[in-house]
C-alpha cells in the first residue's frame, strides 16, 4: 500500500485552561542546513540472532549516544531473559532514569528498577553493584525528600558514596539523573561536577576534531579517461589514395640507373616528406592539445543544465554536484582583485560534467565528492594571480623550431619535385606531388590524434596521482574523527554547562528549582551528520532552557556553536505560571495501515508554548534521512531517535502540566512527588 494515498496529517496535543490557541503549523527545516554527512557505522545496529554481548554493546551505545529509551528496551530484554549481570542492571536503571522527571518513574518503570536491583542480590558484589547502590541511595534520598522525611544524615551518606565512585561513574550518574535529582542534593553534587564539566566538555581535542564528524566518508578519486579519438573514414581514404599516388609516382621512375638529377630530386623529396610528416604531426597535435585544454577552461556557449544525463544518474545528484561546485569555488575565491566568477566559469562547467560522469553511477552521494571538489577549487585558486588556468597555451603550443622545420621540409620537397621535373620525370613528379599532398595531410591528422590520446592518458594519470595523494592526506586528517558517543557526551555536558550558567545568571541556585527542562534544535544553516540508526548531530544548536521555580518560569534561549563550545546571543524571558496559555505539539507526517499493523512516517514535531500575551516559544525536532539509506532504516524509528535527543520528549509532560495547571502547578507537583514517594512503599 502506498503512502501517497494518505492525506497530510497534523496531530495536535494541546494543554490549555480555556485559552485560545492560534494556528499550529508543522515546520520542516531540512532545506535550511548547508551540508549533510552520513556515516555507515554500525554502532546502533542489532539483529535478533546477535549474542548478549553484542546486544549489550549496542544498548550501551544508545545510552551514551543520547537515546536512552532504546537502551532501556535492550538492557531490559537482557535482564528479563536470563542474561543479567550487575553491569547490565546498573545501566538498565540509568537508562530508565535518563531524560525522565521524578514522578514519571512509576508503575512498570519503578517495578523494573526494583527488580533490577533484586537481580544483583544473587550476583557477586563488584564495582557495578557499588555504582547501582549509589544510584539507589540517591533515589532513596529523593523519595524521603518528596515525602518530607529527608535528613542530613541520608544526604551526607549518599554524597559520600557518590564521591567514592570513579570519575567515569560519577559523570554517568550525574548526566543521566539530571532531571531526577533536585534541591539540595543536586546543588551539592554539581558543586564539584560543574567545575569538571567546564574543563571536560572541550576534551579530548574537541575544537580540533568536532568539525570532522560533519565530513562525509570521502569518495576515492577515479581515473578520468577520455574516449579514444578516431580518425574519420575520409582521412583513412585520403591516406590510402595519397599513398597509392606516391607509389605510382615512384614506380613510374625509370628502372634503370638514375641520372644525377633524378637521384637528387628523389632524395630531396624523401627528406622533405620526412620533415613534413614528422613536424606536421607535431604541429597538428599541439593544436589539438590546446583545443582540448581550451574546452576545459573556456565557458561553453550555452551553460549546461543540471539534469540527469540518463544511465540511471538521478537529477538530484546532478543538482547537488552543481551546487557543491559553485559553493566550493565561492569559498576558495582568493582575496585578490579580479573577476573570479568569469575566470572560473569554464573550469566550473568542466568539473560539473566531470564529476557527474565519474560518480553518477558510483553508488556514492554528492557530499562524498565534496572534498575533491574543494581540492580542485583550491588548486585553481592557487594560480589565480598568474592566470594559471591559461598557462596551457604557452606550455602546449608547438615550438618555433618545429614550425621552422616544417617550412624547411615543405621547401625541400618542392625543390625535389622541381629537380625531378627538370630531369625529365614530370609524370612521376606529378603523381608524387598529388599523392603526397593528400596523403601527408591525412597521415598528419591520424598521427596527431594518436599523439593527443597519449597526451590525454598521461595527463589524466598525472592528475589522478595528485588526487590520490590528496585523498590519502584527507583520510589521514579525518582519522581521529569523533565517535557518535563523544558527540553525545559533549552535547550533554554543554547542556549541563548552559543550564548551570543560566541558573547563575538568574541569581538562583539549584535549591530554588522545582524542575528544569533543556531542549535543543539544530540551528539554521548548521552542518548536520549522523551514523546509521543514530540521532542527528548539528554543528550549531539553539538551546532552550526552562528553569521552573516556585515564583515562576525563567526561560533562556542561546545559540551554541558546537564546534567551539561557544554560546552567544542569549535571550531571556521571565513569566508567571498564570501567563502560560497553552503547550502544544504539531507533527508533520502521515499515518496509515499496512497489512495488520499501523505505520507512521513522521518528519518533524514542533513544540510550542503560547503565553497569554500571544508570544510563542517554539522548538523543532525533525527526522531526516540521507539519500540511499531508505532500505536500511525505519523512518518512524529515526523520528523517535531525533525526538529523544532534542529533549522535547522529556520536556512535554512537565510543560504540558505547567500550561494546564497554571499557578496551581507547584501544589500539584508536590502532590505528584508525594504520590511517587508513597509508591515506593507500595
Image (cartoon, grey):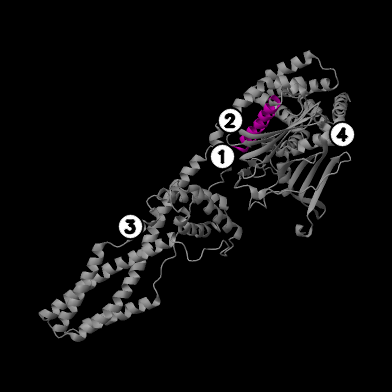
Horizontal side of 266 relative to 184 (left or right) equals: left
Mark 4 lies on a secondary structure that is helix
Residue 231, placed above or below residue 194: below
The main secondary structure of the magenta stretch is helix
Instruction: Name above or below for residue 563 compared with residue 431.
Output: above
* Residue 259 image label: none
Nearer the observer: mark 4 or 2; the answer is: 4
Q: Going from the N terminus, do you reach mark 4 or mark 1 first?
A: 1
Quadrant in which the C terminus appears? top right
**Mark 3 → mark 4, Cα distance in angstroms:** 80 Å
Separation of disc 2 and disc 1 at Cα?
A: 13 Å
Mark positioned earlier in the residue sequence (3 or 2): 2
Disc 1 residue crowd, few under 14, some 14–19, many 20+, Cα 10 Å: some
Q: CA distance from mark 4 to mark 1?
A: 44 Å
N-terminal label among 2 and 1: 2
> Eyeballing the image, is 473 above or below 299?
above
- Element class at badge 3: helix
Write the start and end of the magenta stretch as one range. 481-504
Contact (Cβ within 8 Å) of mark 4 with mark 2: no
Q: Quadrant of residue 574?
A: top right
Are discs 4 and 1 less than 8 Å apart at CB? no
Q: Which residue is mark 4?
A: 661
Q: Which residue is mark 3?
A: 395
Dot placed on the residue nearer the N-terminal end, 3 or 1:
1
Secondary structure found at label 2: loop
Which residue is tagged 2?
202
Q: Mark 4 to mark 2: distance in Å?
A: 40 Å
The tag on residue 211 is: 1
Q: Are marks 3 and 2 in contact (CB under 8 Å)?
A: no
Q: Is residue 126 visible?
A: no
Amino acid at each position: 500500500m502506498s503512502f501517497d494515498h494518505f492525506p497530510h496529517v497534523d496531530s495536535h496535543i494541546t494543554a490549555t485552561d480555556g485559552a485560545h490557541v492560534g494556528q499550529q503549523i508543522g515546520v520542516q527545516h531540512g532545506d535550511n542546513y548547508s551540508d549533510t554527512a552520513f556515516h555507515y557505522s554500525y554502532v546502533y545496529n542489532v539483529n535478533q540472532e546477535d549474542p548478549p554481548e553484542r546486544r549489550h554493546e549496542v544498548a550501551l551505545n544508545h545510552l551514551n549516544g543520547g537515546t536512552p529509551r532504546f537502551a532501556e528496551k535492550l538492557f531490559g530484554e537482557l535482564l528479563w531473559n536470563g542474561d543479567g549481570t550487575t553491569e547490565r542492571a546498573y545501566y538498565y536503571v540509568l537508562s530508565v532514569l535518563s531524560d525522565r522527571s521524578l514522578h514519571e518513574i512509576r508503575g512498570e518503570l519503578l517495578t523494573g528498577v526494583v527488580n533490577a536491583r533484586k537481580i544483583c542480590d544473587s550476583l557477586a558484589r563488584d564495582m557495578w553493584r557499588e555504582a547501582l547502590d549509589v544510584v539507589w541511595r540517591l533515589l532513596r534520598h529523593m523519595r524521603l525528600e518528596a515525602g518530607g522525611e529527608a535528613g542530613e544524615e541520608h544526604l551526607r551518606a549518599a554524597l559520600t558514596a557518590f564521591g567514592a565512585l570513579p570519575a567515569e561513574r560519577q559523570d554517568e550518574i550525574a548526566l543521566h539523573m539530571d532531571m531526577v535529582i533536585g534541591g539540595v542534593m543536586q546543588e551539592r553534587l554539581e558543586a564539584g561536577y560543574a567545575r569538571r564539566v567546564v574543563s571536560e566538555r572541550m576534551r579530548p581535542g574537541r575544537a580540533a576534531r568536532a568539525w570532522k564528524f560533519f565530513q562525509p566518508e570521502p569518495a576515492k578519486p577515479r581515473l578520468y579517461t577520455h574516449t579514444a579519438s578516431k580518425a574519420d573514414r575520409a582521412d583513412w581514404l585520403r591516406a590510402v589514395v595519397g599513398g597509392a599516388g606516391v607509389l605510382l609516382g615512384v614506380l613510374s621512375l625509370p628502372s634503370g640507373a638514375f641520372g644525377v638529377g633524378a637521384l637528387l630530386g628523389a632524395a630531396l623529396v624523401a627528406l622533405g616528406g620526412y620533415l613534413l610528416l614528422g613536424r606536421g604531426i607535431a604541429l597538428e597535435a599541439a593544436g589539438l592539445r590546446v583545443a582540448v585544454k581550451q574546452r576545459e577552461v573556456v565557458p561553453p556557449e550555452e551553460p549546461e543544465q543540471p539534469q540527469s544525463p540518463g544511465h540511471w544518474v538521478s537529477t538530484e545528484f546532478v543538482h547537488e554536484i552543481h551546487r557543491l561546485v559553485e559553493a566550493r569555488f565561492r569559498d576558495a575565491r582568493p582575496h585578490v582583485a579580479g573577476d573570479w566568477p568569469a575566470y572560473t566559469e569554464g573550469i566550473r562547467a568542466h568539473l560539473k560534467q566531470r564529476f557527474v560522469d565519474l560518480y553518477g553511477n558510483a553508488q556514492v552521494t554528492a557530499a562524498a565528492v565534496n572534498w575533491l571538489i574543494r581540492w580542485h577549487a583550491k588548486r585553481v585558486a592557487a594560480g589565480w594571480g598568474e592566470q594559471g588556468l591559461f598557462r596551457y597555451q604557452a606550455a602546449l603550443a608547438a615550438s618555433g623550431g618545429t614550425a621552422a622545420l616544417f617550412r624547411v621540409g615543405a621547401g625541400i620537397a618542392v625543390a625535389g619535385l622541381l629537380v625531378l621535373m627538370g630531369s625529365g620525370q614530370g609524370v612521376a613528379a606529378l603523381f608524387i606531388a598529388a599523392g603526397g599532398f593528400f596523403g601527408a595531410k591525412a597521415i598528419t591528422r591520424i598521427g596527431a590524434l594518436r599523439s593527443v590520446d597519449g597526451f590525454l592518458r598521461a595527463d589524466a594519470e598525472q592528475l589522478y596521482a595528485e588526487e590520490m595523494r590528496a585523498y590519502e592526506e584527507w583520510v589521514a586528517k579525518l582519522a581521529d574523527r569523533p565517535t557518535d558517543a563523544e558527540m553525545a557526551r559533549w552535547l550533554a555536558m554543554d547542556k549541563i554547562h548552559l543550564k548551570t550558567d543560566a541558573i547563575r545568571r538568574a541569581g538562583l541556585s539549584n535549591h530554588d528549582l522545582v524542575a528544569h527542562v533543556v531542549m535543543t534544535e539544530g540551528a539554521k544553516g548548521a552542518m548536520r551528520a549522523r551514523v546509521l540508526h543514530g540521532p542527528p548531530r548539528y554543528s550549531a544548536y539553539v538551546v532552550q532552557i526552562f528553569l521552573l521555580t516556585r515564583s515562576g518560569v525563567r526561560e533562556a534561549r542561546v545559540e551554541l556553536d558546537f564546534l567551539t563550545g561557544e554560546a552567544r546571543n542569549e535571550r531571556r524571558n521571565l513569566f508567571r505560571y498564570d501567563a502560560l496559555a497553552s503547550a502544544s505539539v504539531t507533527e508533520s507526517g502521515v499515518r496509515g495501515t499496512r497489512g495488520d499493523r499501523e505505520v507512521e512516517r513522521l518528519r518533524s514535531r514542533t513544540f510550542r508554548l503560547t503565553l497569554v500575551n500571544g508570544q510563542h516559544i517554539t522548538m523543532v525536532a525533525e527526522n531526516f534521512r540521507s539519500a540511499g539509506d531508505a532500505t536500511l532504516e525505519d523512518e518512524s524509528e529515526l523520528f523517535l531517535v531525533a525526538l529523544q535527543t532534542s529533549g522535547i520528549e522529556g520536556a512535554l509532560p512537565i510543560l504540558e502540566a505547567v500550561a494546564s495547571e497554571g499557578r496551581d502547578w507547584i501544589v500539584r507537583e508536590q502532590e505528584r512527588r508525594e504520590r511517587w514517594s508513597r509508591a515506593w512503599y507500595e
